[in-house]
Amino acid sequence: MDFKSLVVAYFQHYTILAYLAATAVCVMVFALYPASLLQTAAAVAAGMLIYPLVWHLLHQYVLHGRWMWKSKWLSPTWKRIHYDHHQDPNHLEVLFGALHTTLPTIAIATLPIGWLIGGVGGAAAALATGLLTTCYYEFMHCIQHLAFKPKAKWIQHMKQRHVEHHYFHEDGNYGITNYMWDRILGTYYEKKDIPKRSPTVFNLGYDEEVAKTYPWVKELSGGIASGHPRRRALGKEGADAA
């Protein structure tokens, strides 16, 4: 997929359409229950500041936490929202977040602080900020997984850090598009800072030994794949025995 095809596909994807529709509802709610200009600006600013932190913490401690696979009920969600993505980072069908997990998260992260700042109107403004920020995240995330080099230096930097997260070491660079919190929380790195590739970068620690006790992700996946996804696709590295 080239850049033009990405833009067309992006605006046709049901998750993006849902986010934009929800943003339109926020605008209508704000029109009915407007906050002051100062309250609105504060709610938008709070949403823009808090959203990257919430995403960072969820990415680090939930998506990369080694606890969801221990539950028969949570393991399908973990498999869909992150394990499959790390197994094959360029598999576009699992690139976009699932609405049943993203929409509640965006609402929980933005509505309370928006309400405290400006009531209903502030909550609508903060939620709209979270929804549009998610659209931005999803678009940049797609760029990071397309096989082309962006012209803009800042996008190159962003993409390189995310590529390192997927192909070199998964324990860092959680921000995707914003690495401010990685720097603050000590999880930012560049490849030159890490001595060697993580052995769990593609399976997130879910291996055959873990599957003996917690088999649900393996059963849903039809086995546990090992090694670089491109080499697996070429048949140079197979999947571990199911």
Image: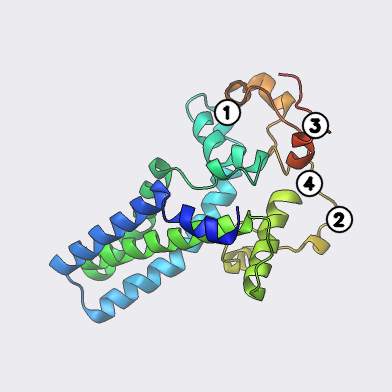
Which is nearer the N-term, disc 2 or disc 3? 2
Relative depth, front residue between 117 and 124: 124
Relative depth, front residue between 176 and 214: 176
Which is nearer the N-term, disc 1 or disc 2? 1
Q: Which residue is the site of mark 3?
A: 235
Contact (Cβ within 8 Å) of mark 2 with mark 3: no
In three-dimensional space, the C-alpha distance between marks 3 and 1, rounded to whole angstroms, equals 30 Å
Q: Which residue is the site of mark 1?
A: 70
> Which is in the foreground here, disc 2 or disc 3?
3
Which is nearer the N-term, disc 4 or disc 1? 1
Q: Which x, y percent locates residue 214? A: 62, 23
> Which is in the foreground here, disc 4 or disc 1?
4
Mark linked to residue 198: 4
Callout 1 secondary element: helix
Amino acid under disc 1: Lys
Residue drawn at x 39%, y 63% as measured from the top left: 132
Q: Which residue is the site of mark 2?
A: 195
